[in-house]
Image: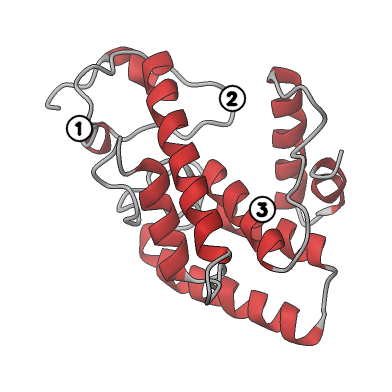
Amino acid sequence: MANPPPALFDLEDGQTPLDPDEATGLKLVWVATRSDLNDAEGANIVSGMRWGGRQIRGKKPAKVATEGFLRALHARMFGDVWRWAGTFRQTERNIGVAPHQVAMQLRQLFDDVQAWQEFGVYPLDEQAVRLHHRLTFIHPFPNGNGRCSRVIADLFLQRHGAEPFSWGPAPHGAAVRQQYLAAIRQADTGDIHPLLAFVRC
């Protein structure tokens, strides 16, 4: 797609801007608006979530907190829509670590998760919240980081026998999204408690 429609660049608060070069990775010629994109990604995300569920319920349940699983899940969630799904970003963002630090930061995160589990440093819910927050902070992919990290957190919980998060009170909408973003920004300052409370509302 040589010239992505300008409407694809319309953003809501908290959404990561698309780099123009990355926007050319759109696979679907019928997508012309942000609404079209949301519909296409939504269907792909559901498919990716089902794949993730199968991986953790197999004869040899997958280990969720690994780079390989993260890449594979992102590719399954967005690969029908974007050519770059499952590959780390190469451009700077207004959020996230520098591109050359992504792989190193992920290795540190997954080592930390292993230690949390081995030594019982945090309760399981807090491990999942911290995993989610650190993934959003690192922001490894061009787009879809928040959605992928929420799915990772839920799969992590389910892999260890717990229920997935509610991600705020129902029904989910603009007001709940603002609560979520406020909790994420508070976690960025080092205070994880609002996010920990939000995910089980």
Which quadrant does the N terminus fall into?
Answer: top left
Q: Position of residue 26 (x, y in %)?
A: 24, 32
- Secondary element under disc 2, as helix, strand or loop, is loop
Mark 1 — residue? 24
Query: In this orientation, which residue lies closer to the viewer: 118 or 92?
Result: 118
Instruction: Tell me the tag on residue 154.
Output: 3
Seen at 22% across and 37% down, the residue is 25
Relative to 63, say whether 92 is above or below: above
The residue type indicated by label 3 comes to: Asp
In the rendered image, which quarter is residue 9 located in? top left
State which tag comes first along the sequence, 3 or 2.
2
Q: Amino acid at mark 2?
A: Asp
Left or right: residue 146 versus residue 119 is left
Q: Residue at x 26, y 38 (%)?
A: 22
Nearer the observer, 75 or 7: 75
Q: Give the crowd class for mark 2: few <14, some 14-19, many >=20 residues within 10 Å.
A: few
Circle number at residue 13 = 2
Of discs 1 and 3, which sits in the foreground?
Answer: 3
Viewer can see residue 138 = no
Residue 23 visible, this angle:
yes
